[in-house]
Amino acid sequence: MAMKKRTKGNITAPSLPGKDMLAEVNNNEAGNIYNSLFAKNRKVEYDNKDIALVNIRTNPDNQIFRAMDDDEDIRILAEDIKRNGLMHNLVVFPEHEEGSAVYVLLSGERRFRALNYLQEKGDATWNIVNCNVVTTPLTENEKKVLLYSANLQVRGGFSDEAIRRQAIAEFITCLQREPYNMSREEALNATKIVSTVNPRTIERDARIEEKLKGKLKTLLNDKFLTRSECETYLRFEADKQDEIANRFEKLQAVDCHSDDTESAGKNYVEVLRDTLHDAFRELLYDAQRQGTTKEYEAAYEKAIGYFDDGLADLSAKADEYGRVKASSKPEEISAINYEGKKEAAKDRVRKEHEVTETKSSVIQKNVPQMVKKLNKTYSSKAFVKALKGVSKESRDADVAALNEIIEISTKLKNIIEAIE
């Protein structure tokens, strides 16, 4: 499907895909990608029109992406627009609201919110805004594809994995409907063309979003579980997946009694909870590597039994810890030797259960924790903002450290894949 402005003379449909063509077809990222990807279906016409900001409406389908933008992001964008002007037009389609004509956004909600911010601050410059108005009637699915293609293209790798996974899976689903009628494989490849996300990541996101169900997906979206461990849990039968999810849900619900009076880092109960989480995960990994069904079932039951015993012990210690905190003054709580208790908790689990002596792969033991920490940093807007105050030398050192991780990971991956 392609967009073209009404002009006199012959119109040449855009070809697939080419960055130069993308830059020429439309002065808006959404139009660029939409033109390139869907030129073979039909042409979509639009007019250029000045529209009062008050007559523009946000699109309900953009709710998933809206959650990624906080007030500070919008303020920064507003200041940029105030300095440099509106570099790309809003893309809208007409609708009727209580008998009056209004326009619903297909692309540019962040810009729209920034313009409203400027207006609220007394800047009347943007009371009227120039828009590209789609005049060809579109189905609801076509509108959604246009909106999603714009967001997938301009938002880079996404700061929130859960939003990225949901958006990719939904976009693939839309491309399998009328009028595109793509196969899943075709839709997956089209998504790779549209999005700047790594193609391998798109494949993994689509797979886990489609296959992971119920509580496991909720726990993943809550960032209580990592994607890599959830991919392992998908190898279990459906009833076992439910059992695993129920255990982790109970673990998530444990009250660790943490608050601002704590010293830096996690408290005693939080360390116990994380240690139980890690140990349960490793035992589940170990169950997957058993050679026979009997060994697999025995290892799985061992993991469940270990967790249930550990949870009972954790809950008792959490309750005791809570009573101590409730009866003590904040300064007394702060004086507790947290570091000593943390290490004692870890040592006790190691000695009593010897989880580290299972046949778990050293990579599967260590990588999930590293991924969890890096994901937490990646999802933190505070981290991105803090980078602005960091020296270039320090940023270069960070890049070098990450390149080192990538290099050794690639080497290990090649060794593993080379094994027949």
Image (cartoon, rainbow, N blue to C red):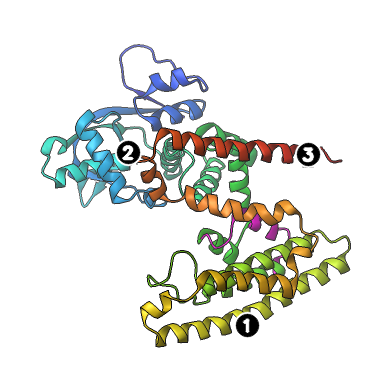
Q: Which mark is residue 415?
A: 3
Which residue is drawn at the image coordinates 48% and 26% (left, top)?
A: 36
Q: Which mark is residue 312?
A: 1
Indicate which disc, 3 or 1, sits on the residue closer to the N terminus: 1
Residue 341 visible to the viewer = yes
Give the vertical position of 56 relative to 212 (above or below): above
- The quadrant of the rendering that contains the C terminus is top right
- Pinpoint residue 232: horizontal percent, then vertical percent: 70, 57
Tags 3 and 1 touching, CB below 8 Å: no
Give the vertical position of 88 relative to 54 (above or below): above
Binning the other alpha carbons within 10 Å of mark 1 as few (below 14), some (14 to 19) or many (20 upward) gives few
What range of the chain is rendered magenta? 223-239
User: As rendered, which of 237 and 3 lies closer to the eye?
Assistant: 237
Q: Helix, strand or loop at disc 1?
A: helix
- Pinpoint residue 331: horizontal percent, then vertical percent: 37, 77
- Pinpoint residue 365: horizontal percent, then vertical percent: 70, 57
